[in-house]
Image: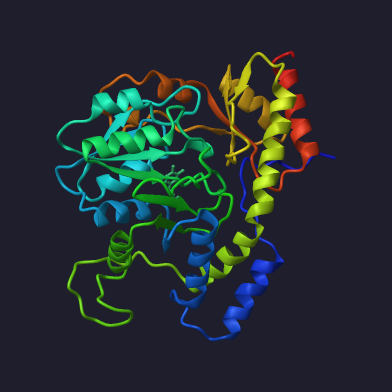
Amino acid sequence: MQREFIMQMQPWFGDEEKRSISAYMDENGFMTEFKRTEQFEKMIAEYTGAKHCIVVNNGTISLTLAALALNIGVGDDVIVPNFTMIATPNSVKMIGASPVFVDVEPETLCLNIELVKKAITPKTKAIMLVSANGRYPLAGVEAFVALANEKGLYLIEDSAQSLGSYYPNGKHIGTVGVLGSFSFSAPKIISTGQGGCLVTNDDDVAFRLRRLKDFGRSGGGNDIHDWIGYNFKFTELQACLGIEQMKKLAGRVEVKKIMYRRFQEGLKAVQGIRLFDHDLNNTTPWFVDSFAERREELQAFLKAHQIGTRIMYPPINKQKAYGVAGEHPISDLVGQKGLWLPSTTQLPLEDVDYICEKIRSFYGA
Ligand SMILES: Cc1ncc(COP(=O)(O)O)c(C=O)c1O
């Protein structure tokens, strides 16, 4: 009998989510954000240790909203990593700002601070620090805070992949810059289908975010508008999912770490593939990322053995959508060798062993 296909990623919802949605439906609520959304926001604020959490419809618009709240717009530059999900630069492109691509560190795939320093000009307004796969830059987030302060820039943390990951100083990733952004899209450690949020410790920024995401209304449900705002709101149904998912987060964090260690152990002797050194004491890998020799061949081989993989994000400056000149060797390398192995939280360890065995056999290890 053929074994079932192992997906590279898959959300994980259970009976608890079903029951919660069903109970909400019996209440005849408005569906629009209300008490359950507030509860979900409170859970994230408590988990991350942030003063405020504001949920929105996804982890791209959260970044756009962050930029709007900080008055970033036409004529402003925002430094972003050249290796990230394309949502990071697109979020500011949408409001007329220009993303400036900077290469990442080979060890962490997070922004290289020395290159960031060189890229800062009088037009730079913000740095979007992406914690790639839950990792933090080798230079340390404190160096980014100091740089941003010295140059009068905003540090926005795109922590879409980092719920459950902390800096070595004990602060949750996303809570050190002026704003941190998270995503709850399908492959994330917790999901609401689509969804995202911003966390901040700044009361004024939180106030601006809440107004801007709700048409610029001066108060809940009224039609008095002193500002131009938008509709970036959540729904109670998503909050029902999110609340139940948050209850499972601590367990998932542990599972992700155990799984990552098992992959590291199973592949440590293999010359052709290299996993990243993760600080598993503090951070939680969202995906199992690797540099793989003969990547496409390996991918086809694994697929023939019912194992799904995914090619990591190509260098953004070379995507047709941007086509910006510049050499960024590390993000180029990811474009050539970066491969995500199966990373679903529900992946049994026996399947991890099977995947490692197949990879070893591919490389003749
Ligand atoms: C680093 C990063 N930023 C932003 C996003 C966008 O999030 P969403 O899909 O919720 O819009 C993602 C999604 O994977 C991401 O990985």
| Image height of 355 relative to 272, above or below | below
Q: Residue at x 77, y 37 (%)?
A: 351
Taking depth in this image into account, of 6 and 67 the one nearest to the observer is: 67
Q: Is residue 313 left or right of residue 318?
A: right
Residue 33: x and y in percent read 44, 74
Quarter that holds the C terminus: top right
Q: Is residue 185 left or right of residue 248?
A: left
| Image height of 272 relative to 150, above or below | above
Asked whether residue 55 is in view, the answer is yes
Residue 229: x and y in percent read 24, 66
Residue 269: x and y in percent read 72, 16
How many dots with numbers?
0
Taking depth in this image into account, of 27 and 37 the one nearest to the observer is: 37
Q: Residue at x 63, y 37 (%)?
A: 281
| Image height of 322 relative to 29, above or below | above
Q: Residue at x 43, y 60 (%)?
A: 51
Quarter that holds the N terminus: top right
Rendered image quadrant of residue 122: top left
Rendered image quadrant of residue 299: top right
Residue at the limit of the structure toward the right, as seen here: 1
Residue 89: x and y in percent read 32, 41
Q: Residue at x 48, y 65 (%)?
A: 41
